[in-house]
Structures are given as structure tokens and as C-alpha cells.
Image (cartoon, helix red, strand yellow):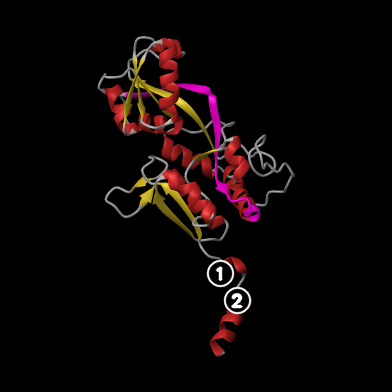
């Protein structure tokens, strides 16, 4: 009875934020530079880790980030294992019908990478008779094979994006097609590799998904991210991890109205004041 009274007294004395459970989330821990093993071991690091650790701090919450395969993240969210997904997740109509999203914090787009000194790619037609390397099982493989049949170039499929990049550096392939953040990151680390043409029609939001019963938590997370946009924190993290400062109209710097991604299902356009500490 005494212990129960003590527990009740503690619960009444301390504010909810002080006793809230840590936020539970997960990332693909092999997706550099978003999340990757630290050199020498001892956990994971990357853009996503810095981004959501800081967002949680501003929400006055601890956070636990699990490294796992991307395929298990959405099932883990839906089963209650995770409170949200910290891995970069593309907002699609189908996903937005089944989950709540914050506003986007990064643009994702398909981008080519080429070897330094190679002629820049202006369109798909420039690849006729050449070879394009891609990571197996990705949308980049699907699109490249479709366009390769149409235009007349070969597609080399590799188990990882680093292997696809090495094919370009070694001369086996003329270009590789991948995600813009990964292509830019690789170019920032290797002077022989150049980030080239961006397929602007593939542009989409990367945002954090929540279950549909987590409206308040989603809103709190978006407010934290929006404050990080407002004070330049996300832009600084982007430059740190991707090797280039984002443009003024990139999502790292853009606060969109309402909650969620405009034009997508479950978007809440209701205006709200943003209060940043």
C-alpha cells in the first residue's frame, strides 16, 4: 500500500513529459548517409539519427532507434512496435491513405551519377548504346529497365548501391541511377564521381509516418521539425551529411501549411501557430 501511494505521488508530482516513455523508432542501418554503422563500432550514425534525436529532444522525449531492414519498418509501426518511422519514407497516395505523415523534411528524387570527365547526361536518349548500373530490387532498377528497352541501353544490376557506383568508376557502366541524397553523398566523398542529371518528375516528399491513431504525436513531431527548419538546423544537418547546402526552396528550409503533405490523403490543412522554444 505504501509503495502504491509513493508511485501515485510521483505520478502527480512530475509533469507528463518528464515521465513519458522514450519514442520507439527504427531505420535501415545500412543506408548511408542516412543511417550507417559508426566507424569502429558502437552504434549507428547519419542524417536520420541526428534529425530525430534532435526532434525528440525538442519534444522533451528520449528516443530509441533500432537498426533493421526497411521491409520490417511499416509492419513494425502498424503492430505498435514503433511510434513512428525514422527511416526516410517516400510519401505516396497509398501510404498516406493508411498512415499519417508529417510534412516533408527532404525531397527525394532519382539522380544519375557519372565518372568525372564523362559527358553530362541531358536526357535518357544520351544513354543509347551505353550501360547503366543500379541497385537490385529498387525503383531505379525498374525504371532503368523500362527505359533501356525503349531507348536501347543495357542495365547492370548489383546487390548494393556502392557496387553500382564502383561499376561507373571502373568503366563497366557509363552511369548509375540512384536516390539524390545518396548520389550527392557519394560525390562529396569521391572526387572521381559526379552527381549529374536529376529526374525532376520523380520528385517526392520524404516524411515521418505515424499510425492514424497518433494525431497528437504526429503534430508534436511536425512542430519540432518545423522549428528545426525555421532556425536552420535541418539545413545544417543536410549540408553536413550530403555535402551541399540546400537551396532556399528545398524542404529542409520550407515550412508547408497545415499538418502532413499538401495534396495527399489525411492532410490536415487547418492553420496552426508555430511556437518554438
Ranked by sequence position, the earlier of labels 2 and 1 is: 2
How crowded is the residue under tag 2: few (<14 C-alpha within 10 Å), some, or many (20+)? few
Q: Does residue 208 belong to the magenta stretch?
A: yes
Q: Is residue 235 left or right of residue 16?
A: left
Q: Is residue 198 left or right of residue 255?
A: left
Residue 178, given in percent of the width and then of the height, sits at 41, 28
Residue 184, given in percent of the width and then of the height, sits at 41, 30
Q: Magenta residues: mostly which secondary structure?
A: strand
Name the mark on residue 11: 2
Residue 75, given in percent of the width and then of the height, sits at 49, 49
Secondary structure, mark 2, is helix
Residue at 60% across, 74% down: 14
How crowded is the residue under tag 1: few (<14 C-alpha within 10 Å), some, or many (20+)? few
Place residue 126 in its image quadrant. Answer: top left
Residue at 30% across, 22% down: 168
Residue picked out by circle 1? 19
Q: Which residues are magenta?
A: 193-216
Q: Residue furthest bottom?
A: 2
Whether residue 130 is visible, yes or no, is yes
Q: CA distance from mark 2 to mark 1?
A: 8 Å
Amino acid at each position: 500500500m505504501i509503495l502504491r501511494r509513493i508511485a501515485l505521488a510521483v505520478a502527480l508530482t512530475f509533469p507528463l513529459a518528464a515521465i513519458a516513455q522514450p519514442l520507439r523508432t527504427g531505420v535501415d542501418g545500412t543506408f548511408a548517409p542516412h543511417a550507417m554503422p559508426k566507424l569502429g563500432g558502437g552504434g549507428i550514425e547519419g542524417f536520420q539519427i541526428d534529425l530525430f534525436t534532435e526532434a525528440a529532444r525538442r519534444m522533451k522525449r528520449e528516443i530509441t532507434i533500432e537498426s533493421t531492414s526497411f521491409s520490417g519498418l511499416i509492419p513494425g509501426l502498424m503492430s505498435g512496435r514503433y511510434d513512428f518511422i525514422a527511416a526516410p519514407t517516400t510519401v505516396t497516395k497509398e501510404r498516406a491513405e493508411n498512415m499519417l505523415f508529417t510534412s516533408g523534411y527532404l525531397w527525394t528524387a532519382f539522380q544519375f551519377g557519372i565518372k568525372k570527365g564523362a559527358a553530362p547526361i541531358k536526357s535518357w536518349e544520351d544513354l543509347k548504346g551505353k550501360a547503366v548500373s543500379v541497385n537490385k530490387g529498387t525503383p531505379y532498377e525498374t525504371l532503368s529497365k523500362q527505359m533501356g528497352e525503349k531507348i536501347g541501353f543495357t542495365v547492370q544490376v548489383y546487390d548494393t548501391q556502392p557496387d553500382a557506383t564502383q561499376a561507373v568508376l571502373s568503366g563497366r557502366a557509363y552511369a548509375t541511377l540512384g536516390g539524390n541524397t545518396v548520389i550527392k553523398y557519394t560525390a562529396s566523398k569521391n572526387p572521381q564521381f559526379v552527381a549529374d542529371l536529376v529526374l525532376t518528375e520523380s520528385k517526392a516528399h520524404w516524411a515521418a509516418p505515424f499510425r492514424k491513431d497518433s494525431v497528437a504525436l504526429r503534430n508534436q513531431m511536425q512542430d519540432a521539425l518545423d522549428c528545426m527548419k525555421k532556425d536552420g538546423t535541418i539545413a545544417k544537418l543536410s549540408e553536413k551529411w550530403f555535402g551541399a547546402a540546400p537551396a532556399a526552396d528545398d524542404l529542409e528550409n520550407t515550412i508547408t501549411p497545415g499538418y502532413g503533405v499538401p495534396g495527399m490523403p489525411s492532410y490536415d490543412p487547418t492553420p496552426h501557430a508555430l511556437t518554438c522554444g
